[in-house]
């Protein structure tokens, strides 16, 4: 296969490539204690494998409650689905700090402007520092192990429906040890 230049088609690691023209913001969360909802939100993109190919999923999560504020799917890595998820999350509240990785979707001028116009401070993970965004990385682990890996999605519609149902379960039914066995929705809604 190597001699013929053939390779398997699969999502490659490191989906988060920064655009050289985009501004990178410092990481603001080192040694910060998370004490309340809407103090810190973060976002990230992951891929969802399907029977043939894959789709992308972006989610916005509140760090204190682990509540998934919004999510969107796309068949491309275009920034539009990330901006839509951000706008949907901002309809309900505004964080003090919004953390992302340095991917081109999140460093684009329109994405940064949306965060700043909402009144949030922009924070970005260091290069290759997945632990800087640990809560959304932990969310991806839960989504994949408790939902995605248990299914063999034939269509985008099937994946979107099933994962949407999982997010409802995650927010409103799944108990979290770190939340004293409450759901993210209970913590997020009862903290107002």
Image (spheres, rainbow, N blue to C red):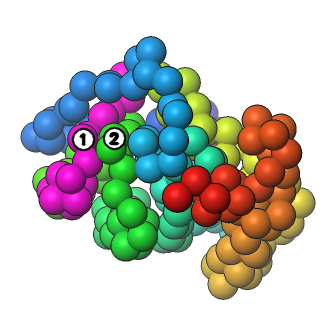
Q: Position of residue 127 (x, y in %)?
A: 37, 23
Q: Residue at x 55, y 24 (%)?
A: 131
Per the model, the C-alpha gap separating discs 2 and 1 is 5 Å
Residue labelled with disc 2 = 97
Relative to 40, is 187 on the left or the right?
Answer: right
Relative to 184, is 173 on the left or the right?
Answer: right
Relative to 52, is 118 on the left or the right?
Answer: left
Give the magenta range. Answer: 113-127
Image quadrant where residue 53 sits: bottom right
User: How many numbered marks appear?
Assistant: 2
Q: Does 67 appear above or below 7? A: below
Closest to the observer, 148 or 69:
69
**Which element is circle 1 on?**
strand
Residue labelled with disc 1 = 121
Q: Residue at x 14, y 41 (%)?
A: 22
Q: Position of residue 7 (x, y in %)?
A: 60, 44
């Amino acid at each position: 296969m190597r001699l013929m230049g053939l390779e398997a088609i699969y999502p490659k690691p490191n989906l988060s490539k920064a655009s050289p023209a985009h501004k990178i913001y410092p990481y603001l969360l080192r040694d910060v204690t998370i004490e309340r909802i809407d103090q810190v939100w973060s976002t990230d993109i992951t891929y969802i494998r399907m029977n043939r190919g894959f789709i992308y999923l972006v989610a916005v999560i509140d760090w204190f409650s682990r509540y998934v504020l919004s999510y969107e799917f796309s068949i491309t890595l275009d920034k539009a689905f990330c901006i839509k998820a951000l706008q949907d999350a901002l309809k309900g509240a505004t964080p003090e700090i919004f953390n992302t990785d340095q991917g081109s979707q999140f460093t684009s001028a329109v994405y940064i402007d949306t965060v700043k116009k909402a009144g949030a401070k922009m924070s970005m993970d260091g290069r290759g520092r997945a632990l800087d965004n640990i809560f959304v990385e932990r969310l991806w682990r839960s989504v994949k192990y408790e939902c995605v890996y248990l299914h063999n999605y034939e269509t985008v519609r099937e994946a979107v429906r099933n994962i949407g149902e999982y997010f409802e379960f995650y927010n409103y039914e799944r108990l979290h040890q770190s939340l004293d066995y409450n759901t993210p929705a209970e913590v997020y809604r009862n903290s107002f």
